[in-house]
């Protein structure tokens, strides 16, 4: 495979405009305190970029580990700022941009495109309980699932005798950028100058990803060329769409810097946003959540406890009886067929109309009514029933207890 190499004079000439570019870029980041990633770069650090594009994909993960299935694409994009980019990863992405800018001036590789791939592939080196140490090495190491052809996965038999992926039967994607071993052997570089090409190093992996994207013709500042390069990296339209959305968000400043050495848990979402559920299941979960968040109902004004300091006349403590005409109509104390429930005569209000009012319009609406108290204070039994309807089992006990207290005092 041929390589597009610059002469020493071409590389030296490229340093002048790049110095201006890096200076402007560093000034733009001045308020954020982010590293410029341009310090300490020598001519020997500048990689060679192949003149032809790689035919083999860099990654073949159908469900990249950096994306929580419950959050889906929308949840991933919505949480970019709160998710953060580890310091060593951010440095590696910006260093890769600078190196590739010097190696191939026509590529115009932006750091945010590499960062977007790192977010999708491994959540910036933090998937499966990993974290990046201060040297940018994923610890204890990121390994994909065996590419054995099962469950829709690609089938790639061992190409590295298990040296990179610890599996001598099938290949596994490795490291923060999830390179398959065969591709890594062609594109991997030692960007951090520690003497080895390590796919678990975010520095080596990010620069290698940059080389992969810039190989061949193409200007990555052009959306069409960027999409084509990302699709070569992982041949999935959904993957390309998500990476480009994240890249655009990062370019607009929708990111934060987070410390190294910290692993992250999957992005947790409520059931109403769980993308593994069907739309109807999410709607049902949303309704249940809305009902659960409702505040306890306020008793009708006519049943509130009178203010003892008020001069207003107080209600007669004895409710006015309502004749029972046993016509079976609602509200006369009958049970719908002219027979009072529990065998008693029909009275105006049936036991617990306050509870009945609370559940009207819900599946609990047919609840057998009970006599409404004459004041806003309920008995302990009635208060427990009413609060149980508002705070079902499993919801905060302190709110349930407060509800009961308010209704019984």
Image (cartoon, rainbow, N blue to C red):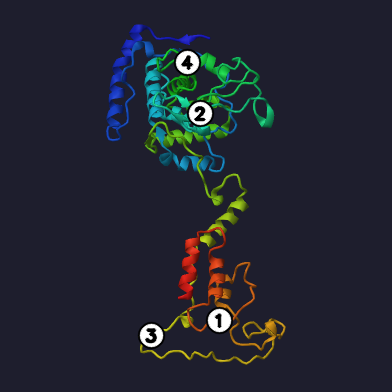
Of labels 3 and 1, earlier in sequence is 3
Q: Are marks 2 and 3 in contact (CB under 8 Å)?
A: no
Pinpoint residue 313: horizontal percent, then vertical percent.
41, 91
CA separation in Å, label 1 and label 2: 67 Å
- Could you tell me which secondary element the residue under label 2 belongs to? helix
158 and 52: which is toward the camera = 158
Residue bearing mark 1: 372
Query: Relative to 46, is 361 above or below?
Result: below
Q: Residues within 10 Å of mark 2 (few under 14, many from 20)?
A: some
Q: Residues within 10 Å of mark 1 (few under 14, many from 20)?
A: some
Pinpoint residue 184: horizontal percent, then vertical percent.
53, 17
Q: Are marks 4 and 2 in contact (CB under 8 Å)?
A: no
226 and 242: which is toward the camera = 242
Residue bearing mark 2: 227
Residue 308's label in the rendered image is 3
CA separation in Å, label 3 and label 4: 83 Å
- Could you tell me which secondary element the residue under label 4 belongs to? loop
Q: Using residue 102 as the reference point, say whether residue 157 is left or right of it.
A: right
Query: Relative to 264, is 331 above or below?
Result: below
Of labels 4 and 2, earlier in sequence is 4
137 and 402: which is toward the camera = 402
Residue 197's label in the rendered image is 4
CA separation in Å, label 2 and label 3: 75 Å
């Amino acid at each position: 495979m041929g390589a597009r190499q610059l002469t020493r004079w071409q590389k030296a000439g490229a340093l002048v405009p790049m110095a201006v570019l890096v200076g402007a870029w560093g000034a733009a980041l001045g308020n954020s305190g982010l590293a410029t990633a341009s310090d300490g770069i020598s001519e020997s650090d500048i990689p060679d970029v192949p003149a032809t594009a790689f035919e083999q994909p860099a990654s073949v993960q159908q469900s990249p580990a950096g994306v929580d299935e419950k959050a889906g694409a929308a949840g991933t994009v919505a949480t970019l700022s709160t998710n953060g980019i580890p310091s060593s990863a951010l440095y590696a992405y910006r260093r890769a941009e600078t190196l590739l800018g010097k190696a191939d001036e026509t590529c115009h590789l932006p750091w945010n495109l590499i960062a977007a791939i790192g977010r999708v592939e491994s959540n910036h080196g933090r998937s499966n309980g990993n974290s990046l140490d201060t040297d940018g090495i994923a610890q204890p190491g990121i390994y994909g699932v065996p590419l054995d052809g099962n469950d829709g996965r690609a089938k790639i038999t061992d190409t590295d005798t298990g040296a990179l992926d610890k599996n001598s039967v099938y290949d596994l994607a490795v490291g923060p950028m999830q390179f398959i071993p065969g591709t890594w052997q062609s594109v991997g570089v030692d960007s951090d100058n520690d003497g080895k090409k390590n796919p678990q190093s975010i520095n080596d992996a990010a620069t290698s990803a940059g080389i992969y994207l810039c190989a061949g013709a193409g200007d990555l500042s052009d959306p069409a060329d960027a999409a084509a390069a990302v699709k070569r990296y992982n041949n999935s339209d959904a993957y390309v769409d998500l990476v480009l959305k994240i890249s655009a968000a990062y370019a607009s400043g929708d990111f934060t810097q987070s410390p190294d050495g910290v692993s992250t848990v999957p992005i947790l979402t409520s059931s109403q946003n769980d993308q593994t559920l069907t739309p109807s299941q999410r709607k049902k979960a949303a309704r249940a959540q809305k009902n659960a968040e409702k505040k306890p109902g306020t008793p009708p004004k006519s049943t509130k406890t009178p203010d003892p300091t008020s001069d207003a006349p107080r209600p007669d403590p004895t409710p006015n009886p309502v004749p029972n005409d046993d016509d079976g109509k609602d509200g006369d104390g009958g049970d719908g067929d002219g027979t009072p429930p529990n065998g008693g005569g029909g009275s105006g209000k049936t036991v617990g109309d306050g509870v009945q009012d609370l559940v009207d319009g819900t599946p609990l609406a047919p609840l057998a009514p009970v006599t409404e108290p004459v004041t806003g204070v309920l008995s302990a039994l009635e208060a427990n029933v009413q609060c149980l309807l508002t705070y079902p089992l499993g919801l905060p006990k302190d709110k349930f207890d407060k509800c009961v207290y308010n209704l019984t005092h």
